[in-house]
Image (cartoon, rainbow, N blue to C red):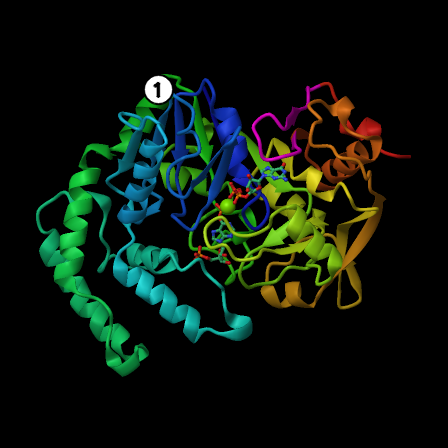
């Protein structure tokens, strides 16, 4: 059975976790394949709220195997903390979680480096990372000389490897630390990671072989993207991006599953836009409406608690990422958050140096300079959180969703009207939102 992918179409936090949990039922495998504990995916089941950083959002569904594959960077302590907290809450993990020996470990020096580079690149140049050591870990992976893979944790030689790398890191980081003192101790790090290794040993596997076998056996696989396509290291708003391929292009490289086995991609997009950290954000609102969206949408980071920057839906950006990730349909989330607004604006084009353009520029300078061209749509000013089918939505809410679908050139398959599993509208293939557009 061709695999199904869930990919964020904006700057992350589009509610991918909710959709993955919703789609997980009846599947064989759920796969996290890039990023690391910079991700924070929320799954809400009734009163229970699960915040997952490394473990796939399918874990809450019983009986499904969850994989963390080669493209992920894993902080072992964070992963074990997540495992423990799920076990405490009665979620059965045993035999339901496997991680790739090929994945790379986030080490204490990566976190030290992430903090240093965030301080060095201040002001407008600040990426505002999650400080989870993600960029430095991927850099060492590509650099090859100072990397530690998950398989290294359980093979002989870890102590020597940690001492060698720590020595180098202390030397290279000393000029950036107060009094030249780098807070890294090789013996302590080895003691800590040896403990992690023993606890993680039963979960370590060859997930590449496992996945290729699953493909041969026609199993049902769901790939869970982290971050969003606009944070993709190659195709996002570089350098204000994360360090992995967070658009659809990362699925194959992160898992080892050939592209032809990826059958369907669902792009997740909020009904407005948010971004955490630095970088261009053409439709950002620095006014009461932006604040209203932040409060109504509870737009504070799942991983860092930072307030998210909020703005109008950018259809030029989402059309770009939807094409880039090859989305077959869109899951439009957080529509309920806009319910109190009298009017809603949507960015339909940009103006750059006096010219109207309808594409997403490929460099940050242009993105900083352009101004959005807006279309104004009427709000619905009715609570929609209990809507469960398309007909339950007020006509203006349907028209809004329909217009976004038209502008993004992609059908909408799901509309989310609240955090709970139940608060999900599934559109039948014969239900066209476009029919509901206000003429
Ligand atoms: P992810 O990183 O893409 O999985 O998204 P996050 O979990 O970081 O952020 C999404 C937040 O919105 C979480 O707190 C969800 O519980 C919540 N949420 C999900 N869908 C909806 C929705 O349709 N409406 C509202 N109001 N909240 C939602
Ligand atoms: P999920 O999976 C939102 C952002 C950071 C920063 C930039 C680089 O929950 O959608 P990094 O720590 O990756 O080096 O930070 O990327 N960022 C996210 N923003 N959601 C995420 O994940 C993010 N992961 C990273 O805020 O701007
Ligand atoms: Mg998140």
Q: Is residue 416 magenta?
A: yes
Mark 1: give few (<14), some (14-19) or many (20+) Cα within 10 Å. few
Which quadrant of the figure shows ligand 1? top right
Magenta-colored span: 415-429
Prevailing SS of the magenta stretch: loop
Quadrant location, the N terminus: top left
Residue 137 percent across, percent down from the top left:
32, 56
Q: Is residue 391 left or right of residue 385?
A: right
Compared across the picture, whether 397 is left or right of 260 comes to: right
**Where's residue 349, x and y in %?**
76, 53
Comparing 254 with 343, the one in front is: 343
Considering every residue shown, the one lying at the far right of the view is 439
Depth check: give the residue in front, 275 or 4: 275
Q: Is residue 413 placed above or below 115 in the rendered structure?
A: above
Q: Name the residue at 38% across, 32% down.
A: 257
Q: Say left or right for 64 vs 247.
A: left
Q: Which residue is mark 1?
A: 216
Q: Residue furthest bottom?
A: 179
Does 57 appear above or below 34? above
Q: Is residue 43 magenta?
A: no
Q: Quadrant of residue 410?
A: top right
Q: Residue at image x 39%, y 19%?
A: 219
The x, y position of residue 262, in whole percent, is 47, 29
């Amino acid at each position: 059975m061709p695999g199904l992918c869930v990919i964020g179409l904006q700057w992350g936090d589009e509610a991918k976790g909710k959709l993955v949990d919703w789609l997980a039922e009846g599947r064989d495998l759920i796969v996290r394949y890039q990023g690391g504990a910079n991700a924070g995916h929320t799954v809400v089941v009734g009163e229970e709220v699960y915040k997952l950083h490394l473990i796939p959002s399918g874990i809450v569904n019983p009986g499904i195997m969850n994989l963390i594959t080669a493209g992920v960077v894993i902080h072992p302590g964070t992963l074990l903390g997540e495992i423990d907290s799920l076990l405490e809450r009665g979620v059965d993990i045993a035999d339901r979680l496997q991680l790739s020996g090929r994945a790379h470990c986030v080490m204490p020096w990566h976190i030290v480096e992430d903090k240093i580079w965030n301080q060095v690149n201040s002001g407008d140049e600040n990426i505002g990372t999650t400080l989870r050591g993600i960029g430095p870990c991927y850099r060492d992976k590509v650099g090859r000389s100072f990397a530690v893979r998950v398989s290294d944790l359980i093979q002989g030689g870890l102590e020597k490897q940690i001492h060698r790398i720590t020595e180098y890191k202390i030397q290279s980081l000393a000029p950036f630390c107060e009094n030249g003192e780098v807070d890294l101790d090789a013996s302590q790090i080895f003691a800590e990671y040896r403990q992690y290794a023993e606890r993680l040993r039963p979960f370590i596997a060859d997930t590449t072989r496992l996945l290729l076998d699953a493909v041969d056996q026609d199993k049902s696989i769901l790939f869970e993207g982290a971050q969003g396509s606009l944070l993709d290291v190659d195709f996002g708003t570089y350098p204000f991006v994360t360090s992995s391929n967070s658009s659809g292009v990362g699925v194959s490289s992160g898992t080892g599953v050939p592209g032809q086995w990826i059958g369907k991609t669902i792009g997740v997009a909020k009904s407005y836009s948010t971004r955490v950290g630095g970088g261009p954000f053409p439709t950002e609102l620095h006014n009461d409406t932006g604040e209203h969206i932040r409060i109504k949408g509870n737009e504070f980071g799942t991983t860092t608690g930072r307030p998210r920057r909020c703005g109008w839906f950018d259809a030029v950006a989402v059309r770009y990422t939807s094409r880039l990730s090859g989305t077959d349909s869109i899951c439009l989330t957080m529509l309920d958050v806009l319910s109190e607004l009298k009017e809603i604006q949507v960015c339909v084009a940009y103006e750059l140096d006096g010219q109207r353009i309808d594409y997403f520029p490929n460099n940050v300078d242009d993105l900083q300079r352009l101004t959005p061209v807006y279309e104004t749509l009427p709000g619905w000013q009715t609570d929609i959180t209990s809507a469960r089918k398309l007909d339950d939505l007020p006509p203006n809410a349907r028209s809004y969703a329909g217009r976004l679908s038209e502008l993004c050139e992609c059908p909408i398959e799901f509309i989310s009207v609240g955090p709970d599993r139940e608060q999900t509208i599934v559109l039948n293939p014969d239900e066209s939102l476009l029919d509901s557009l206000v003429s």
